[in-house]
Image (spheres, rainbow, N blue to C red):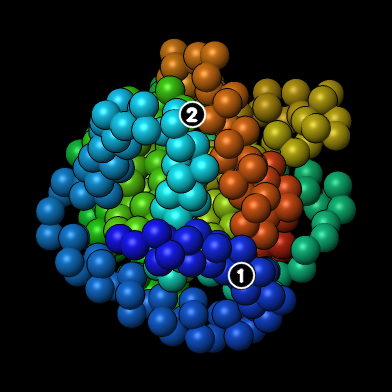
Amino acid sequence: MKNRFKNWIAIALLPQILLVKWIGHYPEFVDAYYSQGFYQLISQFFRSLLGWSSISFGDLIYCLLFILSVRYVILNWKKIKDKPKVFFRDFVMVLSVAYFTFHLTWGLNYYRVPLAKSLELKETYSFSELEEITKSLIKKTNQLQFEISKDSTEKINIPYTHKEFFDLTIDGYQKLEQKLPQFAYKKPSIKNSLLSTMLSYMGYGGYLNPFTNEAQVNAKVPSFRFPIIAGHEIGHQIGYSAENEVNFIGYLVTSNNDNIYFKYAAYAYAASYCLSEIKRRDKTKAATLYATFNLGVKKNFDAYYTFWKAYDNPLEPVFKNVFNTFLKANNQKDGIKSYYKIVTYLVAYHLKYPIEFKS
């Protein structure tokens, strides 16, 4: 590749950044023509191309690129030291190509119309409303735990293989589509990540590969949380990027599933997030509410906490900070804290659609 051409590709990074930020000021345009238009075509193409296999091609590509990058640096170390400007130019050129590809295949979804607006959910709530919804979620969780086990002290183990989890999640999306057509999921491609051990040490339950559109789930995650994570990653696949939005979509599709284990996982998940928000504001109130969980539910929470504790390591905060920076650079000003904004959606949704209980 000629140097002049390389220079132009590298220089193109800056106007690309400016163009993306400018387009971001027009979310209705992005939503109509990219998220619901071009993106649906390109994402379904990649899922059709790669979804036939349970192997994660995206993981393989990442591993290959990492190996080739290390090999390049080792073999060209002297040249890099002698001509650092050329190496920097080549690095920016690769970054420019990656930036273009990322936004073409998925990244512009960060600038679409917020889900709260499209679902007509209010984005403010009072503490009393939060407390009311949290109590309802705890009650529903307890009811489901007892319905499954017939023993309030028993921890729930969901008896499914990962393939069965994925099939049930896809079924859940098909059902949700009948109620909310914007969550239609065509050409499924959801897989266990080949890098699950690494994801565990990084503190991640899964991820979407934006270049292959494969939804990756950490295969080591306990079954108690597996349905939510699968639903979350598919939420990214169908074109939603904000973490609070896909957290909510994961809850929505899992709680609306006909399967009782999925419902249990969903309501326990939602209750834990709402309780965390109460704890942030009133620790005494949170402790009082936590005490009302069935002992079996608490055992599930403890097992999930123990799982992540086993993977604690000094580098995890570094990975989290990198991801936090990535989110902030992509129109999520709260960064990694945006995950917790699911509470706004949970409260607004259940004020609009109250939780139903069996008599």
What residue did someone put label 1 on? 15
What residue did someone put label 2 on? 203
Can you give x and y, in whole percent of width and height, for residue 162 in the image? 23, 41
Q: Residue at x 73, y 48 (%)?
A: 334
257 up-or-down from 87: above or below: below
One can see residue 210 in this view: yes
Q: Residue at x 33, y 75 (%)?
A: 42
For mark 1, does the 10 Å Cα neighbourhood hold few (<14), some (14 to 19), or many (20 or more) residues?
A: few
Q: Secondary structure at mark 2?
A: loop
Among numbered discs 2 and 1, the one appearing first in the sequence: 1
Can you give x and y, in whole percent of width and height, for residue 52 in the image? 12, 60
Nearest to the observer: residue 108 or residue 272: 108
Q: Quadrant of residue 51?
A: bottom left
Nearest to the observer: residue 316 or residue 8: 8
Can you give x and y, in whole percent of width and height, for residue 295 in the image? 53, 21
* Three-letter code for the amino acid on which mark 1 is drawn: Pro
Left or right, 17 with respect to 151, comes to right
* Image quadrant where one finds the N terminus: bottom left
Left or right, 350 with respect to 4, comes to right
122 up-or-down from 66: above or below: below
Q: Quadrant of residue 32?
A: bottom right
Q: Residue at x 77, y 68 (%)?
A: 122
Can you give x and y, in whole percent of width and height, for residue 208 in the image? 39, 52
Residue, far front: 82
